[in-house]
Amino acid sequence: MIDAGGPSRAPRPMDLTPFRSLLRQRLSQVLARNAGVSARLRQAHGLPEDWEERVTLLNEEAALDGLDPDARAEIRAIQTALDRVDDGSYGSCARCGSFMGEARLRVLPFALTCVSCTAG
């Protein structure tokens, strides 16, 4: 059976490792796109090269100010998704609690809501 990405009431257990990796890769891409700003932020704020430490520090508003609004929003969304992976809520719609579907999460790994809630 193919998962069409629609909601279902009971979240299925799934291996979150690929999603964690995908989120980390997306975060690296955002930071790479903003490499100039990222380098200036590291110098100004003493940010480490390690991406996990960098994200923790980038959550501070002052560090994010140097990034364009889209990059700031994407970094926050990715960090929220990584936090949801850690707390076990990843894959559940933040609005209705339904499982979002692996297909949706592959397309938009930092989605917070299912297709139905997003449309409604």
Image (cartoon, helix red, strand yellow):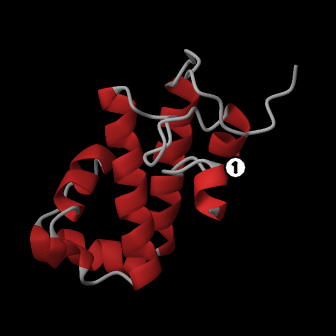
Question: Looking at the picture, does residue 16 appear above or below residue 26?
Answer: above
Residue 53 horizontal/vertical position (percent): 22, 48
Question: Looking at the picture, does residue 101 appear above or below residue 112?
Answer: above
Q: Nearer the viewer, residue 115 or 71?
A: 115
Position of 11 with respect to 119 (left or right) is left
Residue position for label 1:
107
- How many numbered marks does the figure carry? 1
Q: Tell me the quarter of the image containing the C terminus.
A: bottom right
Residue 19 horizontal/vertical position (percent): 55, 34
Q: Nearer the viewer, residue 108 or 48?
A: 108
The extreme top residue here reads 13
Position of 103 with respect to 108 (left or right) is right
Residue at horizontal 53 percent and vertical 60 percent from the top: 29
Residue 102 horizontal/vertical position (percent): 67, 33
Question: Looking at the picture, does residue 92 appear above or below residue 107?
Answer: above
Q: Nearer the viewer, residue 32 or 71?
A: 71
